Amino acid sequence: FWINGFVEDSLVGYDIEFIVLKLPAGTKFAVDAKQAKGPIAQAQPLDSAAVRTILLALPGCKPGPQDSIDYLGSGLSYARLTIEPKAIHVENNCGAKDLLKLQAAIAKALGPVYIRDLQSGQLHDADSYAEWWNKPL
């Protein structure tokens, strides 16, 4: 990732995936990893060209290496997004505000988008992710 004119690969973030899903009305978030497996397995394939166009139209997004998309948010907030067959993988070094801004923009174009926490396996909507992010350590 480019920062101040040099490539920095050693920064560590909290990677997530954006997944477009249709979930039953009344789903309670966060959905635990075991319960999330079924809906995630049923995710529909993404049109990578359409998703790429959507992402590149967002403020702060630009083409990255190997078809990725780099996002630079507020302060030192940044992410590298890679479009996979059924998810958008996010090498995340963003604060929740910037991450949720990306999620909302994608959802506006594609429909309901959820956040899969790759460390815990939980599935979040915007509210549960913001709540998780803001909880005391």
Image (spheres, rainbow, N blue to C red):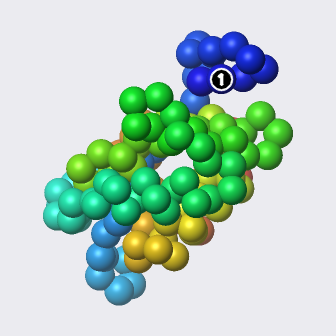
Q: Position of residue 51 (x, y in %)?
A: 40, 59
Q: Quadrant of the C terminus?
A: top right
Q: Position of residue 25 (x, y in %)?
A: 35, 86
- Provide the secondary structure element on which disc 1 rests: strand
Please name whichever residue, 137 or 9, is drawn nearer the observer in this view of the structure: 9
Q: Is residue 137 left or right of residue 76?
A: left
Q: Amino acid at mark 1?
A: Trp
Q: Residues within 10 Å of mark 1 (few under 14, many from 20)?
A: few
Is 92 above or below relative to 28?
Answer: above
Identified at 26% across, 54% down, the residue is: 86
* Residue furthest out toward the right: 75
Residue 129 can be seen in this image = no
Identified at 39% across, 30% down, the residue is: 66
Residue, disc 1: 2
Q: Quadrant of the N terminus?
A: top right
Identified at 68% across, 49% down, the residue is: 60
Q: Is residue 27 left or right of residue 128?
A: left
Q: Which picture quadrant has residue 68?
A: top left
Q: Position of residue 39 (x, y in %)?
A: 23, 64
Please name whichever residue, 135 or 93, is drawn nearer the observer in this view of the structure: 93
Identified at 47% across, 28% down, the residue is: 65
